[in-house]
Amino acid sequence: MSLLRVLHAELLKLKRTLAFRVIFVLPLLVALLQFFALLRSKAFGADFKLWETLPSNMLAVWAVFMMPLLITLETALLNGIEHGDRQWKHLCALPVPRHAIYLAKFFVAQGLTAASTLVLCVLTALVGLAVMRLRPELAHSGSVPYGWLAKYAGLVWLASWLIIAIHTWVSIRWSGFAVALGVGIGGTVFALFAASASAGEYYPWLLPMNVFKGERFTTALLLGVGGGAVAALLGCLEFVRRDVA
Amino acid sequence: MIETRRLTRRFGARLAVDDLNLRAPEAGIYGFLGPNGAGKTTAIRMLLGLIRPDAGEVHLFGEPLAADRQTLLRRVGALVEAPSLYPHLTGRENLEVTRRMLGAPRALIDHALEIVQLSRDADRRVREYSLGMRQRLGLALALLNKPDLLILDEPTNGLDPAGIHEMRDLLRRLPAEFGVTVFLSSHLLSEVEQIASHIGIIHGGRLLFQGTLSELQEAHKAELTIGVNQPERATSCLTDAGWGVRVRPDGMLSVPAKTPEDAARINRLLVGQRLEVFHLAPSQVSLEDIFLTLTGGKADERRAA
């Protein structure tokens, strides 16, 4: 009950912030990139399948680059508003359990990430349909694979929970935007090197991408969801016990 | 209403609050007074459960805070140092955030705005507010849940004289009009002495005095000033009788005699020795002097603060 009340309050706090705009802006960047790449492509091979290539490309770019960036920005925005006037002391002096305050932040970050991933799915369909109209040779590419899109978008989102949990803790623990940004950029850049290594199977920033790789699928999902839940609980425990300055 | 038992808190080697036994009675305004760094904010944070004590207990409304913090805090409103506001939201929206968290009725927002006289500016964004308005909105947040107890940490900090005056008037109204007990910290005696019925003086983490203002004055009324024709003889005579005597630069004697009976006894003693007593009066010690004596401060430092 307390958690629902805190979640309700969290939504109001986001009014007039960048948090809602970012949900649309980042998927739109991915969509525009794919749209112009397809539009400007000189020729498509006979075996080119629009509805196999486009959704997997969009989700791959999303999983590796944009979603970690989205999580970095959203958690930093979400928790940055509490650091400004040191709102934590006001929140923690209210008759609300501290774990509800922390978990609400985690759930809102999960919600915003899910919403943005959903926007990406819609844009994937729109980009494909637009390309089919503008490139006659692709006019008969078939219909939008809504089932596949929904399934993999959902899996990518589930595998991102660990990143969300890490960023939620970092952005609550440290007030500076630079720390959150450093962790986000560092995590993403290092993922490029870790991708080919065997340890990449367990690297948090690679988990969303790993759901596409058969041999890493189970680890990605278990570590993403389970690790995310455990990391969120550990962060919550630390927050509950911490002195509020 | 507030009771702490041997409350203690360290930060590393520094003892911020040392064996604090506060007793703030119901109704009225309790002024928690002390110079900067005396331990007021640390004590207040422990009262609200923001930080844990190393030892001791906090009791609110007769119940231990640790046992049921949430239920007890439902009856408490707090403003710790600067108000915690979201500048991108309006005043009303700031209150709405807290209202949602409390699950309180919506009508309480207008009630709180009315008390702090911010109804007209409620729909402006907080980033456009003056410091005084922000402070009043912070107070509205603390009052939102119609608390029985209001805990305010330096609520006039940073305000200009007009803002201080406004805040003081507002606080003075709260116990009488709304039945709220106010626990208010300040480093300025002038702030507290005008509105508080009870005070506690903290310095170096220790509570040096607790009681009403008149009790404080009574406890430190202390000295009897004596004018006598032969100060040296009078000094030895009083010293022989067991009194501590201080000879002032103007030749008058100061004796730590507290009661009228003491004054009569001293007068009898001196007259009995054929000394001529031409002045015998308790010296008036101002509250400021008492505060400075207790906290070891200097008037200049206090004014600079």
Image (tube, coloured by chain):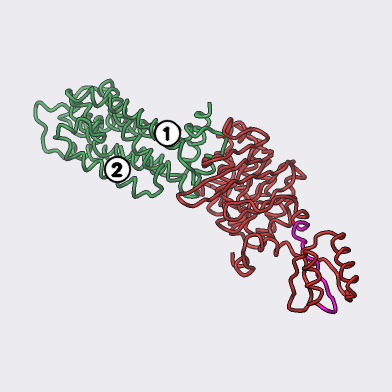
Chain colours: A green, B red
Q: Check residue B145 in the rendering and tell me which mark sits there, or answer none.
A: none
Residue A160 vs residue A76: left or right? Answer: left
Q: Residue furthest left?
A: A46
Question: In the image shown, does B92 or A83 lie closer to the viewer?
Answer: A83
State if disc 2 and disc 1 touch (CB < 8 Å): no
When asked about the image quadrant of residue A38, the answer is: top left
Q: Residue furthest top?
A: A147
Q: Secondary structure at mark 2?
A: helix
Which chain hosts label 1? A
Query: Is B252 placed above or below B80 here?
Result: below
Q: Position of residue B194 (x, y in %)?
A: 74, 57
Q: Residue furthest front?
A: B240
User: Which corner quadrant holds the N terminus of chain B?
Assistant: top right
Dot 1 or dot 2, earlier in sequence: 2
- Name the residue type under label 2: Gly
Q: Check residue A236 in the rendering and tell me which mark sits there, or answer none.
A: 1
Q: Nearer the viewer, mark 1 or mark 2?
A: 1
Question: In the image shown, does A166 or B203 lie closer to the viewer?
Answer: B203
Q: Check residue A184 in the rendering and tell me which mark sits there, or answer none.
A: 2
Crowding at mark 2 (Cα within 10 Å: few <14, some 14-19, many 20+): many
Q: Residue at x 46, y 37 (%)?
A: A241
When asked about the image quadrant of residue A190, the answer is: top left
When asked about the image quadrant of residue A135, the answer is: top left
Q: Secondary structure at mark 1?
A: helix
Magenta-drawn segment: B217-230
Q: Residue at x 21, y 29 (%)?
A: A210
